[in-house]
Amino acid sequence: MTEPSDDKPNSDDDARRMINESLRVSDHSAPVGVPVFTCVIHVLDRAGGVTARVANLPDLNCEAATERDALSQLVTRFKQSIRGMAEEKAEIPWIEPPLAAADEERTRWIPVHL
């Protein structure tokens, strides 16, 4: 029986490890320590656009031309708020359970990475 060569994988795991090392790819299963929060947003169609409000953090709402614009604005503000409170080591004033959506509103759950 011959010894395996150093430059050839013995198994799929070895092949994956060699590729990851050559490309400097980290182990995807290892935790990275990036906090993730769920931003719950209710969206309502209005004449000429939408209104949207965050249901699990107070005082975040907006009006925008499109749902995409509203979500973008609110996710940015949500992230800024959470990041600021985390830096100040302040307690996050979560609304638990999140505010209920009105009958006409659509709800979006958006994972936000800090």
Image (cartoon, helix red, strand yellow):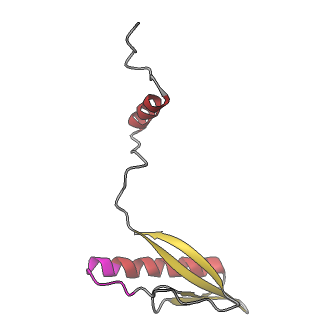
- Work out which residue is located at the far left of the displayed protein and give it: 89
Does residue 107 show up magenta in the picture? Answer: no
Is residue 71 toward the left or the right of residue 57 in the image? right
Q: In which quarter of the image is residue 37?
A: bottom left
Viewer-closest of 65 and 7: 7
Look at the image and give the residue range highlighted in magenta.
84-93
Viewer-closest of 68 and 26: 26
Q: Residue at x 62, y 81 (%)?
A: 107
The percent position of residue 33, horizontal first and vertical second, equals: 34, 60
Q: In which quarter of the image is the N terminus?
A: top left
The percent position of residue 85, horizontal first and vertical second, equals: 32, 81
- Work out which residue is located at the far right of the displayed protein and give it: 47
The percent position of residue 42, horizontal first and vertical second, equals: 60, 85
Does residue 91 show up magenta in the picture? Answer: yes
Instruction: Indicate whether 20 appears above or below 87.
Output: above
Q: In which quarter of the image is residue 92?
A: bottom left
Instruction: Indicate whether 37 appears above or below 6.
Output: below
- Work out which residue is located at the far top of the displayed protein and give it: 1
Instruction: Indicate whether 48 appears above or below 76.
Output: below
Main SS, magenta region, reads: loop
Is residue 98 toward the left or the right of residue 42 in the image? left
The percent position of residue 44, horizontal first and vertical second, equals: 66, 88
